[in-house]
Amino acid sequence: MHSKLGQENVDPTNQKTLTRSERFSMEHVKRSPLLWVLCVIMLLLIFLLGFFFLFSMPATVESTRRDADIIVPNFDEREYRRIVLPNLMQTILVSDPKSTTASAAVSVGVGSNQNPRDINGLAHLLEHMLFLGSSKYPDGRELQKNAELGGGYSNAYTSPEETNYYFISGEKEFEKSIDIFSWFFKDPTLNSESIEKEVQNVDSEHRKNLNNDSWKAMKLIKGISDVNYTYHDFFTGNVDTLWNIPLENNVNMSKTLRTFYEEYYSSNLMKLVIIGNQTLDELEKLATNKFIGVINKFKRPPKCAFPFRDTKFPLEIRFDPVKNTHSLTIAFMLGINVLKHHESNPLKYISDLITYQGPDSLFWNLKNLNLILDLDAGFVTYKCWSLFEIEFTLTDKGVETHEYVIQSFFLWLEYVRQNYESQDIWEIMSKVSEYDFYYMSQKPSTSDSSALASNMHKYPFKYVYATDSILLEQDNEAFKMVLDSVTVDNMLLLFSSPEMSNKNSSVYTDFSQKEEFYGTEYSLLPIDHFKMDSYGYPELDEGKLVLANNSEFIDPKKFKISAKNNFFPKQMEMVCYGTWNPLRFIMDVTHDCGEEAMKADGESITPTLLAKDNKGELWHKLDRSFKIPVANIRIRIETDKGNDNLKQSTTLYFFESLLGEWILENLYDALQMSYSFTFTATANGLEMNIEGYNDKILELTETLLKSFKNLEITEFKFEAIKVKFLNDLENLKTDQPFKLAFMFSKILYREHGHSFNQIFEAAKNLTLEDVENLHSELFNQAYIKTLVHGNILGKQASIFKQSIDSILQAGTLDNPAKAVTRLHFLDGPYVYAYHSFNPDEQDSAVFNTYQVSFIENRVPASIRDLICLNMISSLISNFAYNYLRTERQLGYIASSGAFSIGRSGFLYVTIQGNKESPQEMDNHIEEMLREFRSQEIRNMTQEEFEVVRDSVRQQITQPDQSLSDRTARIWKDITIIDQDFKIREKSLEQLDSLTLEELEDIYVRKIAPDDPKDVQKLSVQFYSSAQYPTLPTEFPNAFTKYKGINELNEEFVKSQF
C-alpha cells in the first residue's frame, strides 16, 4: 500500500540488500556442487516436515468475543469468531442459532486486474466455469439444485481486485452444499467441452448491459486510464475476446483457464465466511474439514497500481445516453490509500458533507433554482486508490446552465474545506451515522457472507461489518488528504444528455468517437486553463454567483450545514406499559420489561383491533422482539376513486412523486435520521408507509398528514414535479425486455389495467387543476386503515387514531370494499406480442405465466394450490435453468419462479437473449415443462417428495428477518388476506397433508396439461425491432394455439402500448 499520488505499490519484502557474508555464502554454494545437492535435500526434508506439521495443526483462533472484537448493530445477537485455517485461509465464522438458513462465501483476492492483456474477461469466465462441476461433483447443477431445495441460491461476481463466490441454502441442505462449494477451490473440472457454451453465457450477460448507462459510463472512465494497466481493458469479456480471437491465435482456452486457476487460486489469497445455526466450535470443525484441502501455493497478493497516474486531467467526456436523463458527474481519481483510515472513514464523511440537503445547502440552492432534480455521491475503494463521484441529475434548465452547476459545486466544496474540521458538524454527522448503523441498518442475515468475505481483504476483523457505514474517529488529516485530491485540476466531467443530439441545443455535441465494446458514441474534450479558472474560481457579483439572467443567484455567504437535528430520539429503551397523565396531556411510559416479555412479542404476529368505526380501523401490535427502538406505521386511505378511471389512476400515481418531493423539502432532518417514507397508489386510493424511531414517529406522521390534508401546490412546483414524473415513465421503456414483459403481464391480468401509452398520455395532459380537484375530493368519502407496529404501546396508538380522524376529517365511504384489484380469470392460453421500445435493443424476451391459484369475487384461493405452487417452483427452478440456459444457451436471463398479485399465484418462466425469437423461446419453455413432467414429476419417489416438502416447510417457518418484514406480513394479512393471521399455521397443515399424487395432478392440470388449450397461460413476447422488424400475426407454437389478447380485454387493446 502507499499514500503518495501516483506512486506504485511496492512490497518491501522485495527490496533486500545482501550482506557481505550472504554474498560469500551464495558464491560458495555456486562453487560447490556437492554442497548444492546437500542443501536441496535438506530443504526438501524441511518442506515435507513443514507440510506435515501445517496440515496436522489445528486452526488458529484469533477472536471469539463478539462485542469486544467486531462492531455490529445493537440488535445483532450472533456470535463471531475469526480463525486462520492451517492452509492460511482467513475465515470468519458466524453462529446464528435462530436462523433456518445458512450460507458461505469465498472471496478470492484476484479479479479482472489479473486478466491476460490478450484475453479480456478471463477471470470472469473462470468464475462461471467453477459452477460447472468438480472431480467429486461433476454435475454442474449440484450446488444450485441443493441450495434451492432449501429456498436458497448461488451466485458470484468478478471485480477488478476480487472474485466473490457465495450461496445460501436451508439448514438441512447446508452440509452437502458447503461440501460441493468447497470443491470449487480444490479441483474444478474446467471441462473443455463446456467452455464454448459458457462463453456464450458470458457474452449474453454482456449484451444485457449494452443499454445500461452506468456500464457505458464505467467503460468510458476505464478508457482514459493508462493503457499499460489491465484496469484499462474490457473486463467482463464477450464471445470475441474469449473465443473468436483466442481461436484465431491458436490459444488453448482450456489450458489457459487451468493456468490462470493454478496461478492465482491459492488458499492464502482466499477469505472464507460461514454463517449457520451451529455453535462456533461446530462451524470451526466444518470449515476445517471442508476447506483444509484447498492448496496453499504461498502466492503473494497482487500488487496495486494507480491506473490514472499519467492521465492528463482535467477532462470532459460527453456521451449519448440511453435513458431520457440529463446527468452530470464530477469524478475524482484519488491516488491515495483511504482503506487504512477505516475509523474516520474520510470518503464517507466528505461525501456526507457534499450531499447534505438541508436548507442553504448546495442541493437546496440548486433545487430552488430548478437546475437539478437530484444530487448523489458515491465512491469505490481499491487497495491503493479510490474513485469518488458526485452526480447531479439535471433539469432541462440545468442542462443549459450546467457550467453554473459546476461553479456552484466548487463554491460549496470551498465551504466544506473551511468547515470540515468543525467539531459541531463532525459530531452530528458521526452521531447520525452511529444511530443509523446501530439501530436502523438492515437486520443481519445469512446473506451477509458475501459482503463480509469481500471486506476481509480491506479491513481488520473489527471493522468488516461496519466498513463504510459509520464514522468513529475525527481524523482531520485524513479528511484533508481526501480534499487535497478533490480539486478542479484533478477533475473528470462525465456529461450525458439527450439534448446533445439536438443541433439547436447549446450542448449539442458532434460525437467524434465510438467505444468498442458498448457502442457508446462520445467525445473526449480537454478543459483549458480559462475554463478551469471559471469552474474553480468563478467570478462573483457582490459576493454572489449570478445566473446569466442576472435575477437568480446563489450567495455562498449563506451556505450552511446545520449542526442540529430535531429528530434525534430522546428515548431509546423498550417500552413496558404506560399511563395517561391528565395534567401534562402525555403518556407516562415505563421501560425495561425484561427479556421474556420482549421475546413473547415475536411468538405471535396477530395484531389487536383497537378501534373500528365508519371512518376506519386501527390495528396495533406491540413488538420489542428485535430489541430496537423503532416502529412502523402503515396507513391506507381507501376512497371511491378507483383505478378504473384513467385520469384518477394517473393522478394518484402523481401523488407518489408529489409527496416524495414534499418530504425532501420539509422533513430533511427526518430523512437524515433514517426515517423512511413510502407512498403508493393502490386500487382505490393511497397508502403511506412510515418507519423510524418510535420516540418521534407518531408526531412525525401527524405532521405529514396535516401537510397532506392542507397541501398547496404552486404552478412552478407542479411543472417541476411533472417533468420528473414524465421522465421516470419514459425511462421505464429502457428497462431490460424481460422486466418490461413482467410489468406488462401484471397489467394485462388486471381487469382495469392501463397501458403504458395510456398512462403516459394521461400524464402529459395532467394539469395542476386535475391534481387540486382530486386532492380536494380525496377525503370526501374515505375509509382509513391504520397499523401501528413496533415499540409503541396500545394506549399510545389509540390516541393516534383520534388524531388521524381529527386531522383528515374524512367523510364516510359507503362501501369500503367497492374498489378492489380484480384479475382476469384466463380460460385458455393467450399471447401478447410487442416491439421493444428501444430501437437499439439487441435482445428479445418472453415472459410466460401460468395461473395456478386464483381469487375470484374476494373468495381466497386454495391455500393448498399455493402450497403446490411453492413446491413446483422449488422443484423446477434448477431444471429450467439448466435446460434453457446451460444446455440450449438461449440467453443469460433464463429463470423460473412464483409470484402473486394479491392472493392469486402464478408460476413464471422467462428468457431473454438474441439467439432465437420469442416464439421459439416460448416453444422451448413448453418443451421444458413437458420434459419436467415426464422426467421429474412422474418419476419422483416419496423420499424425494419429502425432501421438497421439508424445503417448503423451512421457507414457511423462516423467521422474519426484520421489523419491516414482519410489518409487511401483518399488513398483507390485514389488507389482502381478509384479516386472517393464521396463514402460516394453515399453510403448514395443508403442506403436511399434501400427497405426491396431488402435486402431480396440480402440475398436469395447471401447467402442462395433456391438451395444451386447457392451460391458463399468458405469454408476453417482446421482439427486438433490430432483429425482427415485423411482428408475427400468427403464433404457430408446437404445443399451444393462442387466443389473441383482444379476446381477453378489447378495451385494453384499443390503446396500444
Image (spheres, grey):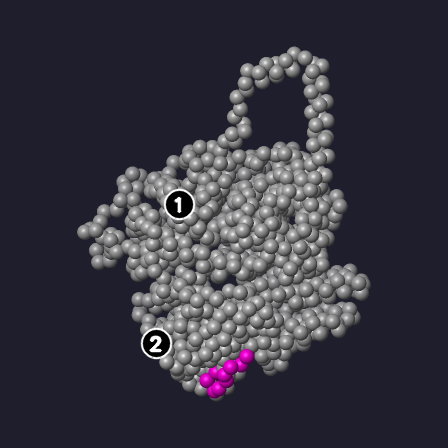
Q: Is 531 drawn above or below residue 100 in the view shown?
A: above
Instruction: Give the residue at the far top of this rendering.
Output: 31
- Hey, what amino acid is under mark 2? Asn
Name the residue located 50 percent from the left edge and 84 percent from the top edge.
612
Q: Is mark 2 on a helix, strand or loop?
A: loop
Name the residue located 75 percent from the left edge and 43 percent from the top edge.
135
| Magenta residue span | 608-616
Is residue 230 found left or right of 527 in the rendered image? Answer: right
Is residue 262 found left or right of 997 in the rendered image? Answer: left
Is residue 52 found left or right of 356 in the rendered image? Answer: right
How many numbered callouts? Answer: 2
Visible in this render: residue 95? Answer: yes
**Residue 488 location in percent, x, y?**
33, 42
Q: Is mark 1 on a helix, strand or loop?
A: loop
- Tell which of 775 and 1006 is nearer to you: 775
Name the residue located 53 percent from the left edge and 48 percent from the top edge.
462
* N-terminal label among 2 and 1: 1
The disc at residue 652 is none
The disc at residue 475 is 1
Decide whether residue 665 is among the magenta residues. Answer: no
- Hey, what amino acid is under mark 1? Asp
Q: Is 781 drawn above or below residue 412 in the view shown?
A: below
**Residue 945 location in percent, x, y?**
77, 64
Task: Choose top left, top right, bottom left or bottom right for residue 661.
Answer: bottom left
Q: Residues within 10 Å of mark 1 (few under 14, many from 20)?
A: some
Q: How crowded is mark 2: few (under 14 residues within 10 Å), some or many (20 or more)?
A: few
Q: What is the chief secondary structure element of the magenta stretch?
A: strand
Instruction: Please name the residue that numbered disc 2 is placed on.
Output: 710
- Tell which of 6 and 506 is nearer to you: 6
Q: Is 996 drawn above or below residue 861 in the view shown?
A: above
